[in-house]
Amino acid sequence: MRPLFVGSHPAVDFLNTAFAPQGAPVETIGDAKAFLAWLVDVALLDEATASRLVRRFGIKAVDTAAEEARGVREWARDWLSRWRVAPEGDYRAEIMTLNKWLDRQGVGREVVASREGLRLVERPRIDAADALVGLVALQIAALITQEQPSLLKHCAGPGCTLWFLDRTKAHRRLFCSATACGNRAKVSAFRQRQRAG
C-alpha cells in the first residue's frame, strides 16, 4: 500500500507511514525502496539522488536505515503524543536523542544564481546511509520548533490511527480527510438520526 499524505507536514506524514485501517496494521516504509520513495514523495530527496544513494551505499545499508527510521517513527509517535498535550514537559532526553539523529546529516552550501540575483542555498549532505534518518529528524525538529503543539491531532474517525496538523483557520479540523473519515462520520450520524426519528 502507498503512504498517505494527509498530515499537512512531512513529520506528521512520517508518523502516518504506519497505520491500521479497520485494525489491520499497514507498513508503508518496510524496505529501502519504499523508504526512499517516501523521501522522494515528500521532497526530502529527488529521484536521481535516491538512485545514487543506493548505488553508493548499497541496498542493505539503506534497508538498515529504513529499519532504523521505523524505530524513530515509533519513538516520535510516543514523544509527540505527550508533547502535544504537555508542551512544557521535561523533554531533555528526547531532545538529546533528536539532536544525535540531526547530527548525522551534514549540510552543503553553495551560491546559486537566479533571476533575483545570487543567493546562498543549503542542501542536505548524505555521507552515509544512516544520514537518511537525519532527514526525518530534521522534519521532526521543524515540527516541534515551528508549530503549535495543540494543532497536532489524531483523526476523530472511529478506528482511524492517522495524525494531521490542523492548518485550518478556525483550528476545528476533526478528520484526516473530509472525503474519507469525515464522510463516514456524516453518513453514520445521518443513519443514527434516521433510526432515532
Image: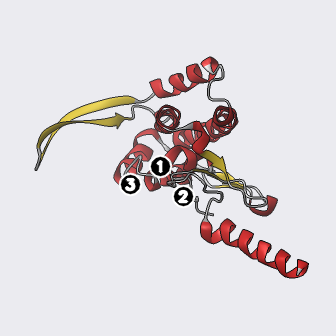
Label whose residue precedes the other's in the sequence (2 or 3): 2
* Residue 100 drawn above or below residue 50: above
* Eye-nearest disc, 1 or 2: 2
User: What percent of the width, then of the height, locates residue 15?
Assistant: 62, 46
Quarter of the image with the C terminus is bottom right
Query: Nearest the camera: 16 or 41?
Result: 16
- In the displayed structure image, the side of residue 156 where residue 55 appears, left or right: left
Label whose residue precedes the other's in the sequence (1 or 2): 2
Query: Nearest the camera: 10 or 133?
Result: 10
Query: Which residue is the site of mark 3?
Result: 47
Badge 1 local density, few (<14 within 10 Å), some, or many (20+)?
many
Query: Which residue is the site of mark 2?
Result: 5
* Residue 92 drawn above or below residue 53: above
> Marks 3 and 1, Cα distance to the nearest angstrom?
9 Å
Q: Residue furthest front?
A: 197
> Marks 2 and 3, Cα distance to the nearest angstrom?
18 Å
User: Callout 2, which amino acid?
Assistant: Phe
Q: Residue at x 52, y 22 (%)?
A: 100
| Tag 2 secondary structure | loop
User: What percent of the width, then of the height, locates residue 152?
Assistant: 60, 44
- In the displayed structure image, the side of residue 129 where residue 68 appears, left or right: right
Q: Quadrant of residue 82?
A: top right
* Eye-nearest disc, 2 or 3: 2
User: Callout 1, which amino acid?
Assistant: Leu
